[in-house]
Image (tube, rainbow, N blue to C red):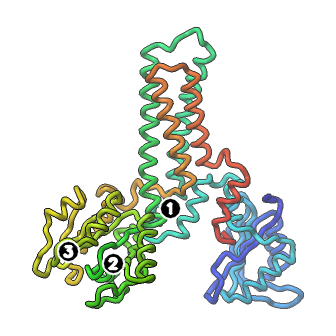
């Protein structure tokens, strides 16, 4: 259980050698603890210094100088946590940071739990839960596009939309509950039609938000793209082309890749994990069997499959087997080695993969690489969105609540259009209202909040 009366402290910068390291304090004793340890050049006392100022001096404990530092002061309520905050900027070595933190703890602070600074910012009303979760997204952003979307969320773009939908749902619910107070009077047809239009619009806006959040999920977690095909079709060569370096060993010997090779790349702001798999072939030993099992494990999690066939050969039994295994996955078929004489039957390939898109490429010569990247990008944004303008980075918790809100509105819409009584409609709208509140963190239990903030690092 979080004790908000405690003053907390932690090292807020990565451990290791560096130019600067920061020990952060937050709470009602932050300034008095600083008084006990900090000796400024002019003998200034931190608790008497103004907010938003920085001061040069030393951290001294038991008459021993621990480090030469810069002290930053941020008084409540205009601080990260809305509490008094002190940051001690030490030299970036492990020893000065550790000794400074130990001194702070000896003087009355408690070691902060993971994410406790941000949790206090949430509990003290400076940010809502979606903004708190955006902090993790900023720290873990893999591309500039992901970072831009996370910053937008931190500024409140997502929570503002959710708040508007929550308010509109509450207003609509109030109207239906008012009708329940007068059961002898039926809703006029004209009035009912207006209510139908309102719930239809709110449902549509929620659906739009849900679709945008799916794109944001990929920006946060990355897109898993699986390279799959029989042995020696050129998967490793393509991986090296996409990555821009020789990540996988390439030889003329079939089956060179026996293990999974993974590499992150950035495609127009989308973090993409390219996975090169062992080539499908007749299983002759335990190694082949294990390699095949790993491919099948990755296939289950893949967002997109790049199915590669050799354009210089006829379709084989292995090609047909792979096509059968991946038929339900989102897939792009690649005919490789088009720089050489072609033997593959495109008609047979089409009948094998159905209406899936086919690209002709030469991984060796670099032909078609940009077309592959465009397909990957378009598979996320459907070719429309640019630079994260409407992409929302939310986590699984918020997305599930958003789904629940949408489903409640959908049921409410069906209920009113079918002419059901106000009680049924009100129940559905309450379900949506509570889901919107969960997203903003207005109705979550303490243990759920703890699980959310435990994902943060200590010091954030």
Does any portion of residue 305 appear in the rendered image? yes
Q: Residues within 10 Å of mark 1 (few under 14, many from 20)?
A: many
Residue to which mark 1 is pinned: 150
Please give the residue where the numbered disc 2 appears in the rendered image.
282
Q: Are marks 3 and 1 in contact (CB under 8 Å)?
A: no
Question: Which callout, 1 or 2, points to the residue nearer the camera?
Answer: 2
Q: Quadrant of residue 295?
A: bottom left
Which corner quadrant of the image does residue 178 belong to?
top right
Check whether the beta carbons of the residues at disc 1 and disc 2 lie within 8 A of each other: no
Name the image quarter holding residue 287: bottom left
Q: Against 315, is 353 above or below?
A: above
**Which of disc 3 and disc 2 is earlier in sequence?**
2
State which tag comes first along the sequence, 3 or 1. 1
Q: Position of residue 376 (x, y in %)?
A: 32, 65
Q: Nearer the viewer, mark 3 or mark 1?
A: 3
Mark 3 Cα within 10 Å, few/some/many (few <14, many 20+)?
A: many
Residue 439 vs residue 255: left or right?
Answer: right
* Residue 262 shows up from this direction: no
Tell me: residue 310, above or below residue 249.
Answer: above
Residue drawn at x 46%, y 31% as measured from the top left? 199
Helix, strand or loop under label 3: loop
Query: To which residue does mark 3 refer?
Result: 361
Task: Give the side of residue 194 with respect to residue 236, left or right.
Answer: right
**Is residue 247 left or right of 23 when viewed as pictured?**
left
């Amino acid at each position: 259980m979080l004790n908000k009366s405690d003053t907390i402290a932690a090292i807020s910068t990565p451990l290791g050698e560096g130019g600067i390291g920061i020990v952060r304090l937050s709470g009602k004793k932050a300034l008095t603890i600083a008084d006990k340890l900090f000796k400024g050049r002019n003998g200034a006392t931190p608790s008497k210094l103004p907010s938003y100022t920085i001061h040069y001096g030393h951290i001294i404990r038991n008459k021993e100088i621990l480090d030469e530092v810069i002290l930053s002061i941020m008084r409540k309520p205009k601080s990260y946590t809305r509490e008094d905050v002190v940051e001690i900027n030490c030299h970036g070595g492990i020893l000065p940071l550790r000794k400074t933190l130990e001194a702070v703890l000896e003087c009355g602070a408690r070691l902060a739990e993971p994410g406790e600074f941000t949790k206090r910012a949430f509990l003290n009303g400076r940010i809502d839960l979606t903004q708190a979760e955006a902090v993790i997204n900023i720290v873990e952003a893999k591309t500039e596009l992901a970072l831009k979307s996370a910053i937008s969320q931190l500024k409140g773009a997502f929570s503002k939309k959710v708040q508007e939908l929550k308010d509109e749902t509450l207003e609509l619910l109030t109207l239906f509950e008012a009708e329940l107070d007068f059961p002898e009077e039926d809703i006029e047809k004209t009035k009912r039609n207006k209510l139908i239009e309102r719930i239809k619009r709110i449902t549509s806006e929620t659906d739009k938000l849900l679709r945008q959040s799916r794109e944001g999920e990929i920006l946060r977690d990355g897109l898993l793209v699986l390279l799959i095909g029989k042995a020696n079709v050129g998967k490793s060569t393509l991986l090296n082309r996409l990555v821009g370096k020789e990540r996988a060993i390439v030889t003329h010997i079939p089956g060179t890749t026996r293990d999974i090779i993974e590499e992150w790349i950035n495609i127009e702001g989308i973090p993409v994990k390219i996975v090169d798999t062992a080539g499908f072939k007749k299983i002759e030993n335990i190694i082949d069997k294990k390699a095949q099992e790993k491919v099948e494990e990755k296939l289950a999690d893949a967002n997109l499959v790049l199915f590669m066939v050799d354009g210089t050969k006829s379709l084989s039994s292995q090609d047909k087997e792979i096509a059968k295994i991946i038929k339900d996955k989102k897939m792009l078929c690649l005919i490789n080695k088009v720089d050489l004489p072609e033997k593959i039957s495109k008609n047979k390939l089409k009948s094998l993969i159905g209406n899936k898109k086919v690209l002709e490429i030469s991984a060796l010569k670099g032909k078609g690489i940009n077309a592959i990247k465009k397909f990957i990008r378009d598979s996320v944004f459907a070719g429309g969105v640019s630079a994260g303008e409407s992409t929302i980075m939310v986590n699984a918790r918020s997305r599930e609540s958003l789904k629940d809100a949408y489903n409640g509105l959908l049921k409410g819409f069906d209920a009113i259009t079918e002419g059901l009584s106000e009680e049924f409609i009100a129940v559905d709208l309450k379900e949506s209202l509570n889901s919107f509140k969960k997203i903003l963190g207005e109705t979550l239990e303490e243990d759920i909040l703890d699980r959310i903030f435990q994902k943060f690092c200590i010091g954030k």
